C-alpha cells in the first residue's frame, strides 16, 4: 500500500480571538490548481464521513458519494487521497479543528501519512482541546501563531475576481466515441507494444474549446477517478470498451504520460502505447494512485473500481450525463423537438480493416455514401 515514509510536521495554528481576518486569509489562499486547499467544515457536522465529503467538495467533486454504503467512511477517504496525489495537492489548511472528534482526527492524520500533505490545523480557542492534544502527541507538530501564518493583509493583496460564469452545457460531438461500443475480441497480453507514432496512428482531434469543457465536466461529474479516466481515454484514443478493459495498472506510467492498450487478435491496429494529453493526465494519475493506495497488485484492471462501488453508471450513460456523444444523424427539417435526440451508439469500428453490414448501422460517416447510392438507384 502506498504511504509517505516521512510526512512534514503538522502546524497547529492558534487563533484564540477567532479573528475573522484570519479566516478570510485562509479562505483566500484556497486554490486547488496551485496545490492549496482550505477546508471549512460544514456547520453542525462532526462525523469523519462529513469531513471527507468536505475535502472532496473542496476538490470540486460531487458529494455525497454514490455506490457505497451510506455510513462507510473508508471509500471517501481513499478517494480523497487518490485525488490529492493526482492533482497534486501539497497544502491543506483545516479551520475549526477544535470541533473535530477523535475519529475524524485519526482519519485526517492517516490522509497526511498517505499523501505527505503539509497539514495546518487552525484552533479558534484559547486552550487547545484535549482530543486535539492527544492526536498530535503521536506525531510531529509545532505551534504557529495566526498573526504570522495568516496575515490580515493577504486578503487585500489578493486580486479580486468576479464570479466565474457557468460552464457551457452544450452537447459536444466527439467522433472518437463512435467506436466505444465496438465488439472487439481483445485481451491483455504480455508484449512490448510500439508507440502510436510508430504504428502511424493519428490521435482523434479535439478542439481546444472542447478540451477545456470536457475537462471541467469530468472534474465535476464524478468523484470516481476510474470512471472519469476511462471516458477521457476513450476521447483521446478512440478505443472501444473491450480495448479499455485490457489496460492494467502496469500499462499506465506513474506520471500518466503514456498508456498502453492491447489488441491481441489485431482487430484494430494491434497493441500500442498512446501518449496521454495533459488534460487527461490527472484522471489517469488518480486511477493509478487509487489502486496503489488499496493493493500492491499492479496487474489489476486499470479502469475497474478497486473499492467495488455498486450502481455506478455505464460508460455510455456517463458520457450522456457529461453531454459528450458521437456524431448523430441529422433531424428532419420539420421536427419541433427542442431537446437533442437520444444518442446512437453505433457498432462501427474506425480502426477495423473490414466493415460488416451490422457494424455500419447508425454510423454517420457512411450516411453520405448511402444517400449517393439511393440517388443512383432512383435515377435508374
Image (tube, grey):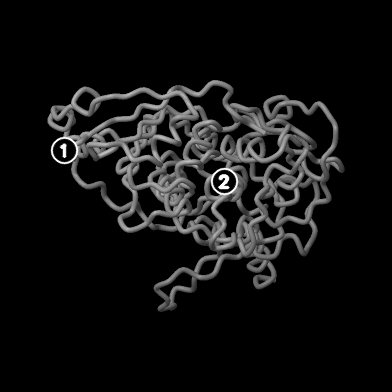
Q: Are marks 1 and 2 in contact (CB under 8 Å)?
A: no
Q: Dividing the picture into quarters, in which one does residue 253 lie?
A: top right
Looking at the image, which residue is at 42% across and 42% down?
212
- In this rendering, would 358 be left or right of 236? right
Closer to the camera, 236 or 63?
Answer: 63
Marks 1 and 2, how far apart at CA: 41 Å
Label 1 crowd bin: few (<14), some (14–19), many (20+), radius 10 Å: few
Label 2 crowd bin: few (<14), some (14–19), many (20+), radius 10 Å: many
Q: Dividing the picture into quarters, in which one does residue 374 lie?
A: bottom right
Looking at the image, which residue is at 45% across and 56% down?
63
- In this rendering, would 80 be left or right of 44? right
SS state under label 1: loop
The x, y position of residue 14, in whole percent, is: 26, 32
- In this rendering, would 316 be left or right of 53? right
Circle 2 residue? 225
Q: Which mark is residue 17?
A: 1
Looking at the image, which residue is at 58% across and 22% down?
5
The x, y position of residue 113, in whole percent, is: 54, 31
Amino acid at each position: 500500500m502506498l504511504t509517505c515514509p516521512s510526512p512534514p510536521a503538522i502546524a497547529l495554528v492558534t487563533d484564540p480571538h477567532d479573528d475573522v481576518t484570519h479566516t478570510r486569509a485562509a479562505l483566500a489562499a484556497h486554490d486547488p490548481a496551485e496545490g492549496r486547499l482550505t477546508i471549512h467544515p460544514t456547520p453542525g457536522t462532526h462525523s469523519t464521513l462529513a469531513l471527507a465529503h468536505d475535502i472532496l467538495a473542496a476538490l470540486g467533486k460531487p458529494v455525497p458519494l454514490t455506490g457505497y454504503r451510506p455510513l462507510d467512511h473508508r471509500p471517501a477517504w481513499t478517494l480523497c487521497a487518490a485525488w490529492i496525489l493526482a492533482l497534486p495537492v501539497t497544502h491543506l489548511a483545516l479551520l475549526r479543528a477544535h470541533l473535530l472528534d477523535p475519529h475524524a482526527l485519526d482519519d485526517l492524520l492517516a490522509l497526511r501519512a498517505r499523501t505527505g500533505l503539509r497539514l495546518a490545523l487552525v484552533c479558534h480557542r484559547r486552550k487547545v482541546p484535549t482530543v486535539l492534544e492527544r492526536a498530535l502527541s503521536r506525531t510531529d507538530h509545532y505551534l504557529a501563531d495566526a498573526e504570522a501564518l495568516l496575515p490580515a493583509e493577504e486578503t487585500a493583496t489578493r486580486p479580486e475576481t468576479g464570479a466565474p460564469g457557468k460552464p457551457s452545457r452544450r452537447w459536444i460531438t466527439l467522433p472518437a466515441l463512435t467506436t466505444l461500443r465496438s465488439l472487439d475480441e481483445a485481451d491483455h497480453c504480455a508484449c512490448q507494444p510500439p508507440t502510436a507514432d510508430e504504428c502511424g496512428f493519428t490521435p482523434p482531434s479535439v478542439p481546444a474549446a472542447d478540451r477545456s469543457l470536457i475537462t471541467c465536466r469530468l472534474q465535476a461529474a464524478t468523484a470516481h477517478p476510474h470512471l472519469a479516466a476511462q471516458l477521457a481515454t476513450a476521447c483521446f484514443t478512440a478505443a472501444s470498451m473491450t480495448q479499455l478493459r485490457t489496460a492494467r495498472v502496469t500499462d499506465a506510467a506513474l506520471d500518466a504520460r503514456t498508456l498502453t492498450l492491447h489488441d491481441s487478435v489485431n482487430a484494430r491496429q494491434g497493441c500500442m502505447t498512446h501518449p496521454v494529453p495533459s488534460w487527461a493526465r490527472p484522471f489517469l494519475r488518480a486511477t493509478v494512485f487509487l489502486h496503489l493506495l488499496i493493493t500492491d497488485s499492479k496487474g489489476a484492471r486499470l479502469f475497474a473500481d478497486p473499492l467495488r462501488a455498486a450502481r455506478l453508471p455505464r460508460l455510455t450513460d456517463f458520457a450522456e450525463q457529461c453531454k459528450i456523444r458521437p456524431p448523430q444523424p441529422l433531424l428532419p427539417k420539420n421536427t419541433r423537438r427542442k431537446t437533442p435526440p437520444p444518442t446512437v451508439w453505433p457498432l462501427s469500428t474506425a480502426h477495423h480493416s473490414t466493415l460488416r453490414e451490422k457494424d455500419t448501422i447508425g454510423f454517420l460517416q457512411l450516411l453520405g455514401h448511402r444517400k449517393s447510392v439511393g440517388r443512383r438507384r432512383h435515377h435508374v
